Image: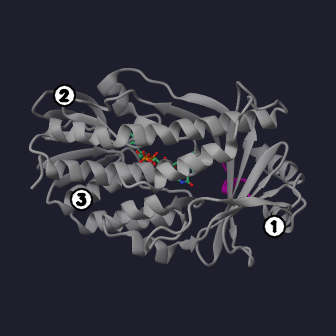
Amino acid sequence: MSAVKKVLVVGGGIGGQSVAIALAKNGVEVEIAERLDAFNVYGVGIIQQSNALRALDRIGLADKTMEEGFPYGQLKMYTAGGHFIGLAGAPPVEKYPSHNGISRRTLHEIMYAEAIKMGVTYKMGTTVTEIENSENEVTVTFTDNTKSTYDILVASDGINSDMRSLIFGEFKPRYMGVSVWRYPFKKHEDLDTSYMYYGKRSKIGFVPMCEKTMYMFLVSAEGAHNPWIEKSAYIPMLKNYLSEFPVKIAQDAREQITDPDLVNYRPIEASHLPDPWFKNRAIVIGDGAHATVPQLGSGAALALEDGVVLAEELKNANTVEEAFNAFMKKRYERCMAIVNASETLAEWELLEFEGKSLPEGASIGQVVGKAVGTLMAPF
Ligand SMILES: Cc1cc2nc3c(=O)[nH]c(=O)nc-3n(C[C@H](O)[C@H](O)[C@H](O)COP(=O)(O)OP(=O)(O)OC[C@H]3O[C@@H](n4cnc5c(N)ncnc54)[C@H](O)[C@@H]3O)c2cc1C
């Protein structure tokens, strides 16, 4: 049984598909309204720590995700020139490795196939324009002017969530001053785990996605006000940043970066809603509630966790309000600990790229260690 029978999920990304699969497994009828006409998930990867795998296990998908991805150990950190600094990330937990790298597209396909198998329906090319959100039900108007009534609406439409604005009013994410560049490659033969190199102007990392592929991320500071960059500048800028890293893997990558269409460039934003993330029968999960800057590689993991925890609370509670309150109790502090830690890391990174000193007592190791401890705790 569940406190709900019919649910609308708005946004078919990682959080949306997680909650949809988890609810459908509890016998709930679930529709996903997705703004895109067809999914077109970009082909770079995602880092999954063991908490992401634990969440996927609760919807029966961890093994498949590891089969299709690349389970690996702790992250190895180096100076730009290749001097070893140390290891980061939790050691293996239970049956889960420290990390799994996987292509975003592959993860999407695994989740989509499971959602379809569980009877979730997708309304593609559709969003919601109006919400009548009462204490007992929620009625929405879709872009095709049809109306439908549901027990609850779950907004999982990402960092710039329109549903969040419809539920709570206007809300804008904050630009963090740093940007992330990503590029997919054939896997470097020696890449046995993920590697990160700290330069003066940027930091780079290489992450395996499966036996055959890997991706590179590069974090840089592109100015306080206009982080938008012409596509024609992508390749020269990336090559220029990579010139700071004499290590072989970076120099090989530098030679192979040739196609601007394969570059995924994103100025990094952050945002979080105050507690509670729900009003009457509508609730926001994933990036719409707590967009985590990627410095701890955890936003998608938290979105996955949100989905499974929300479905579990709806299953265990007698009323929606009880379930939403129980969800907030489990999620708010955990998510905020990661949001705050990753924002601190991004702020310090920006100071370093700008050649400024870190605040007195700043300890990257301590912030990362505490965050990893939080991520490894049960949820
Ligand atoms: C550079 C970068 C690197 C990252 N690396 C990692 C990593 O390694 N590991 C990790 O765990 N996390 C990582 N993240 C974070 C992760 O990508 C996000 O936290 C995660 O995608 C959030 O999932 P979501 O479902 O909330 O939103 P999204 O994945 O953004 O999905 C939102 C969905 O809603 C749809 N949508 C949007 N608006 C509407 C609307 N109005 N109506 C209907 N549908 C709509 C979108 O088309 C999309 O399908 C990274 C983020 C960035 C920016």
The answer to which of 223 and 196 lies nearer the viewer is: 196
Magenta residues (range): 259-264
Vertical comparison of 358 with 99: above or below: above
Find residue 18 and report its horizontal and vertical position in percent.
34, 56
Report which residue position mark 2 lands on: 133
Find residue 256 and report its horizontal and vertical position in percent.
80, 65
> Could you tell me if residue 42 is visible in this image?
yes
> Could you tell me if residue 148 is visible in this image?
no
Whether residue 48 is in magenta: the answer is no
The answer to which of 71 and 178 lies nearer the viewer is: 71
Q: Is residue 374 left or right of residue 135?
A: right
Report which residue position mark 1 lands on: 249
Indicate the amino acid at tag 1: Ile
Indicate the amino acid at tag 2: Asn
Residue 120, numbered circle: 3
Find residue 190 and report its horizontal and vertical position in percent.
75, 77
User: What's the distance in space between the residues labelled 1 and 2, CA to CA?
Assistant: 53 Å
For the residue labelled by badge 2, is the local secondary structure a helix, a strand or a loop? strand
Looking at the image, which residue is at 67% across and 47% down?
365
Q: Residues within 10 Å of mark 1 (few under 14, many from 20)?
A: some
Labels 1, 2: front one = 1
Q: Quadrant of residue 258?
A: bottom right
* Mark nearer the N terminus (1 vs 2): 2
Question: Which residue reaches farthest front?
Answer: 361
Find residue 186 and report its horizontal and vertical position in percent.
69, 72
Question: Which residue reaches farthest top?
Answer: 169
The answer to which of 189 and 162 lies nearer the viewer is: 189
